[in-house]
Image (tube, rainbow, N blue to C red):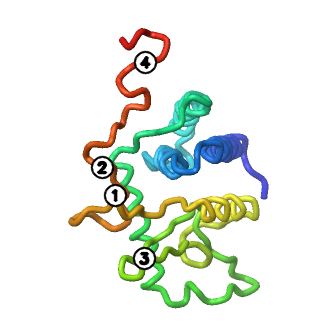
């Protein structure tokens, strides 16, 4: 498929973000991937919003440059990002449950529909996880994107962690403990005498 230069720039930037997230410690990867997905999807832009897309690309290139430093090993993810991700997961689940023909085998004239990002859900009663993907989510996917999604699925991306789940919150929402420190440097900046 032929892509414009701007489309290719967006794809390359997203791939760079995935590579960056995969270079981080295993326990920090979900936060980096969620941060990246949120910033690539919000605000939602149309295919003809050229100047807004270019602005987002410049902003994300600076963000990825900062996050790609080896010293950055943790990332604080806001509640807005968690709620957005829970909404994305629930939308895919409701879409999958409402259309029984979505899981049918694709015919020669109908391409397979799969999700552009890995989305996992946790069954609270059984404590098992599954990845929502093939024939359930919106968008088309390339083989390379399937490989990235498979890597993310194996790494346990987007899964709830039971110790962080509290009553009254959506099950797809991962939250930090109340007393968990969100500051990577624990109140002191390296090389600045703690100021």
Residue designated by label 2: 177
Q: Is residue 65 left or right of residue 162?
A: right
Measured Cα–Cα span from mark 1 to mark 4: 28 Å
Which SS class for mark 1? helix
- Residue 12 position, x and y percent, is 70, 43
Measured Cα–Cα span from mark 1 to mark 3: 14 Å
**Which of the pair 191/11 is nearer the observer?**
191
Q: Residues within 10 Å of mark 3 (few under 14, many from 20)?
A: few
Q: Is residue 190 left or right of residue 8?
A: left
Decide: marks 1, 2 in contact (CB < 8 A)?
yes
Residue designated by label 3: 127
Residue depicted at x 74% and y 50%: 3
First of labels 1, 3 by sequence position: 3
Measured Cα–Cα span from mark 4 to mark 3: 40 Å
First of labels 1, 4 by sequence position: 1
Residue depicted at x 37% and y 56%: 84
- Residue 131, visible in the rendered structure: yes
Residue designated by label 4: 189
Q: Is residue 109 left or right of residue 155?
A: right
- Residue 40 position, x and y percent, is 52, 46
Instruction: Tell me where residue 25 sits by quadrant.
Output: top right
Decide: marks 3, 2 in contact (CB < 8 A)?
no
Which SS class for mark 3? loop
- Residue 59 position, x and y percent, is 52, 31
Decide: marks 1, 4 in contact (CB < 8 A)?
no
First of labels 1, 2 by sequence position: 1
Measured Cα–Cα span from mark 2 to mark 4: 23 Å
Residue designated by label 1: 164
């Amino acid at each position: 498929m032929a892509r414009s230069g701007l489309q290719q720039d967006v794809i390359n930037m997203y791939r760079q973000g995935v590579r960056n997230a995969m270079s981080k410690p295993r326990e920090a990867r979900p936060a980096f991937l969620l941060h990246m997905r949120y910033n690539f999807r919000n605000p939602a832009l149309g295919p003809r919003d050229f100047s807004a897309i270019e602005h987002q690309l410049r902003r994300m290139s600076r963000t990825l440059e900062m996050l790609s430093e080896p010293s950055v090993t943790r990332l604080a993810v806001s509640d807005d990002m968690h709620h957005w991700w829970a909404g994305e997961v629930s939308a895919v689940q409701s879409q999958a449950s409402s259309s029984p023909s979505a899981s049918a085998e694709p015919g020669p004239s109908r391409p397979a529909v799969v999700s552009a990002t890995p989305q996992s859900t946790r069954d609270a009663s059984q404590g098992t996880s599954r990845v929502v993907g093939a024939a359930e989510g919106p968008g088309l996917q390339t083989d390379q994107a399937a490989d990235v999604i498979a890597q993310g699925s194996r790494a346990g991306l987007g899964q709830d962690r039971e110790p962080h789940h509290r009553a009254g919150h959506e099950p797809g929402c991962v939250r930090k403990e109340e007393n968990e420190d969100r500051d990577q440097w624990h109140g002191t900046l390296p090389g600045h005498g703690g100021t």
